[in-house]
Amino acid sequence: LMKPTRVLVRIGKPIYYTDYYGKELSYPDARKLSDELREKIKNLIEMGYSKGSEKDPELSLSIDSPSDMERLQKHDALKSLLKPKSTGKKILKLIDDTWYGFLRALEVFDLRTHFQDAIQMFSGNLVHQLCNTLIPYKTIDFDKYIPKEGGAVIAPSHNSEWDVIIIATAITQKPKRILYQMSKQSLFRVPIVNAWVRNHHAFPLKRGEHDVECYLHARELLEAEQLVCTYPEGTTNPGNGQLLEGHTGCVRLAIDAKVPIIPVGITGTENIYPKHAKMLNF
C-alpha cells in the first residue's frame, strides 16, 4: 500500500483575475484561463519529479472510472472478507449519526465552527508529527504565498487521496489557517469517514454535474475571507506529473468571489496511497 517516498508540496504565486471581475465570463475565456492554471500547476510539480521518472500508461484513468469498477469486481473474495457484517455496519452508522448530531447541536449555539477549528488544528498537528515520523513531507513557499488573512482558492494537483490530508495538514502549520475543502459526495456516505470529513470543514460536491449548492457555499466561504480548496482536475490523475484537463469551475469561482487562485504542485503522494489502492468497503 505504501513505500518510502519524498513528498513535496510547492506553492505558486497567487493568480489574480481583476480584469474579469464584475464581467460575464465566456466559456472560451474560462477554458483559456483554466488551461493557463493547469500549466502553472504542471510547472510546480515538474520541479518535484526527477527527469528519469517513468510514467505508467496503465494507470491513466480516474478512481471510480468504469475500468476501476472492472478491477474491483475481480476481487470479490477480498471484498467479502473486508466488508463488515450487518451489526458492525449498524454500530458504525450509529456512531457516525451521533457525532453528526453533536455537530448540529453545537451549530444551534453558534459553537460548531469554533469546535471544528480547534479539532482541525489539533488533528493537523497530530498528522504533521506522524508524517514527519513515517512519511516526511516538505512544504515550499507556504509562508511566501499563502495569505495570513483573506479569502483565496487553493488549487492543487491531485495524484492521490492522500493529497486531501497533506494540503490541509500543511496549511494548519503554515500559516496556521483553516482550510475548507470540496470533497466528493461518496465520502459522506461512509460511516466514520462522514463524521471525520464534516468535522474538518469538508463539504460535498456532486461530481459529473453542475452542483450549484456546492458552488454557492464555496463562494460564501470565500466572501467570508476563508481558504477554499478545490481540485481543478476533478479527480485523481495518474501521477508522475501527468495532469488531467482542468475544469473551468475553479477559475469561475475565484473570479465570481473576487479572490486569487493559489496553484499548488504536490508530488510523491501517489506512492503513499497509490491509485487503485484498495480500501475497506463499508
Image (spheres, helix red, strand yellow):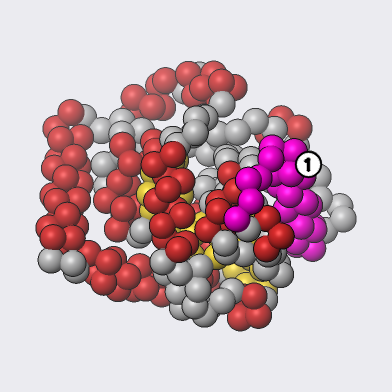
Q: Quadrant of residue 274?
A: top right
Q: What residue is drawn where x is 19% and y is 51%? A: 100
In percent of width and height, residue 16 lies at 68, 64
| Majority secondary structure of magenta residues | helix
Which quadrant is home to the C terminus?
top left
Which residue appears at 29% of the width and 58% of the height?
199
Q: Inspect the image, locate mark 1, and give the three-letter code of the amino acid beneath it.
A: Lys
> Which one is in front, 280 or 105?
105
Estimate the x, y position of residue 58 in percent, counting from the top left. Answer: 71, 30
| Residue at the outermost right position | 51
Total labels: the figure holds 1
Q: Is residue 104 above or below residue 170?
A: above
- Asked whether, in this view, residue 2 is left or right of residue 220, the answer is right
Residue that lies at the very extreme toward the front in this rendered image: 23
Which residue is disc 1 drawn over? 55
Mark 1: few/some/many CA within 10 Å (<14, 14-19, 20+): few
Residue 263 visible (yes or no): no
Is-magenta flag for residue 46? yes
Q: Is residue 91 magenta?
A: no
Residue 229 seen in render: yes
- Measured as percent of width and height from the top left, residue 237 is found at 65, 41
Q: Which residues are magenta?
A: 22-48
* Closer-to-camera residue (131/96): 96
Instruction: Name the spot of residue 96 as percent of width and height, x first.
Output: 20, 46
Q: Residue at x 42, y 20 (%)?
A: 76
Determine the image quadrant of residue 224: bottom left
Secondary structure beneath label 1: loop
Q: Is residue 238 left or right of residue 67?
A: right
The front one of 50 and 114 is 114
> Horizontal placement of 31 versus 198: left or right?
right
The residue that appears at 66% across and 45% down in the rendered structure is: 25
